[in-house]
Image (spheres, rainbow, N blue to C red):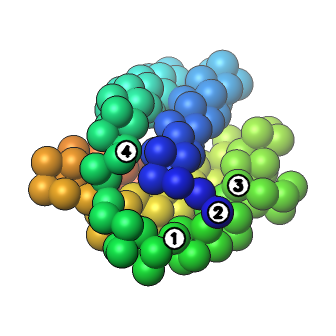
Amino acid sequence: MYSAEEILEIAVKIELNGKEFYEDLEGKTEDKELKRLFGFLASQEDVHRLRFEDLKRYAESFVSPQEWEEIEPYLNAMVQSTFFLGDDKTLAKVKKVEDVREAIRLAIQFEKDTILFYYELLKLTNEEIKEIIEKIVQEEKKHVLMLSNV
């Protein structure tokens, strides 16, 4: 079972992995437009990571104990099944990919999985934190569009 602080730490790890993935792709491609896109996406993941690290200081007030009891099992299942545990999960796959087109497909899936996870976080948060996460969700949606248009 995860605490609110651990869930925020998972969000930090999602962003770190995203940054690393996009930096790897930036180094693998010769296409200047793709290099620029992957570099931009890597920098965006870093900005999101810093926001989540900042939110961790609010972890105790992140969610009421009653709300946490209701949502914790779902978040735990999502974290374990969606993209974290196992070689068949998105995070493991993106680190091994060599083909740029396959990487873009996996990156889109990664961004979509991330958005779903953050939507669940929105259900737990107070208005101040919700605003920050909603902004990150909107930015992640833009990433999907950018990747889809490549």
Q: Earlier in the sequence, mark 1 or mark 2?
A: 2
Mark pair 4, 2: CA separation = 15 Å
Q: Nearer the viewer, mark 3 or mark 4?
A: 4
* Residue placed most toward the observer, 3 or 116: 3
Percent x, y of residue 105? 61, 57
Residue under the image location 59 percent in, 24 percent down = 23
Q: Which residue is mark 3?
A: 84
Percent x, y of residue 146? 37, 47
Q: Earlier in the sequence, mark 3 or mark 2?
A: 2
Q: Earlier in the sequence, mark 1 or mark 4?
A: 4
Q: What mark, if any, has residue 35 been given in the picture?
A: none
Q: What mark, if any, has residue 59 been given in the picture?
A: 4
> Does the CB distance between marks 3 and 1 fall below 8 Å?
no
> Does the CB distance between marks 3 and 2 fall below 8 Å?
no
Q: Is residue 48 visible?
A: no
Q: Earlier in the sequence, mark 3 or mark 4?
A: 4
Q: Nearer the viewer, mark 3 or mark 1?
A: 1
Question: From the viewer's perspective, is residue 87 above or below residue 14?
Answer: below
Percent x, y of residue 51? 32, 32
Q: Which residue is mark 1?
A: 72
Amino acid at dot 1: Glu
Q: Local crowd at mark 1 within 10 Å, few (<14), some, or many (≥20)?
A: some
Left or right of 141 on screen, residue 113: right
* Residue placed most toward the observer, 132 or 28: 132
Q: Local crowd at mark 4 within 10 Å, few (<14), some, or many (≥20)?
A: some
Q: How many marks?
A: 4
Residue extending farthest bottom = 70
Q: Which residue is mark 2?
A: 1
Residue under the image location 53 percent in, 62 percent down = 113
